[in-house]
Amino acid sequence: MARGDEEGELLTPAAHKQLQSELAELEGPKRKEVVQAIATARAHGDLSENFEYHAAKNEQGLLEARIRVLRHRLQHGTIVDEKCVDCRGTGGVTKTRTINVRFPSGVADGQRIRLSGRGEPGDRGGPAGDLYVQVGVRPDELFGRSGDDLTLSLPISIAEAVLGADLRVPTLDGPVTMRVPPGTPSGRKLRARGKGVARKNGPPGDLIVTVDVQVPDGVTGEARDALERFAKLTPPAGRERLEARVRKGS
């Protein structure tokens, strides 16, 4: 046999003959044997507690179910004397080829795209299955992604953090100017609306820019003198509560 109990089954002559022989056995001697067992058990009286009767009825149900299966296979099956070398009797041949796939806007890593009718050929001329393409998005060296939002780290200097600055940052549509307000701490997030991932339906996401205040490893000369003057002219960092806890623990 080429396949299991299904409509349109392909059968070798030997398999077809075997099914006919089994069906004849079940419809003849086997069916008579089960009917006789039921009649014998019924003669013993009360059927509600008659184990032999219920066992025989159960066997009869299984027998009739098997007979229906065999009749269906013999009625709908096709005898194949010699299978095709290419399709192995299935009626279809699998070949590999390259096709172009269009990815919709906003496709995400791990998402599956269904291509109808691009899968395995159907049995005996039936419709082909579908091809599922799983998307793998290659990481970008600058941009990250959170849902439909893009993320970007923006390094700035201490002076830019204190004084503020207008800085150009890249987006998928070209550079835009981001306003860094005076007194911006490291880690603050700035948002460029509509500069994220395009959606198939609806407005695009945003570009989320995270400020990264970079501190130089060391300064000398005039830069150091300027920082020391800056430290004298500005209030100290707000560590009052920490210092109070330190004094309390001493």
Image (spheres, helix red, strand yellow):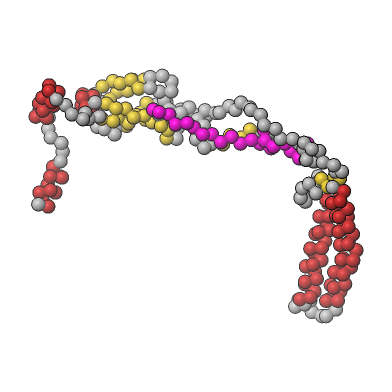
Quarter where residue 44 is shown: bottom right
- Seen in the picture, residue 73 relative to 135 is either above or below; the reply is below
Query: Is 122 inside the magenta-drawn segment?
Result: yes
The magenta stretch spans residue 71: no
From which residue to which does the magenta span run? 118-142
**Whole-percent x, y for residue 95 in the image:** 70, 32
Q: Residue 25 vs residue 90: left or right?
A: right
Residue sitting nearer the eye, 227 or 41? 227
The percent coordinates of residue 216 (x first, y second) are 21, 28
Q: Residue at x 15, y 41 (%)?
A: 239
Across and down, in percent, residue 195 comes to: 41, 25
Residue 207 shows up from this direction: no
* Towards the viewer: 88 or 108: 88
Instruction: Say above or below: 19 vs 197.
Output: below
Whether residue 213 is visible here, answered yes or no, is yes
Of residues 172 and 46, which is closer to you in this image? 172
Residue for point 37% across, 26% down: 192
In x, y percent, where is residue 152?
36, 29
* Residue 223 located left or right of residue 3: left
Say which residue appears at 12% left-offset and 32% top-offset: 235
Q: Main secondary structure of the magenta part?
A: loop
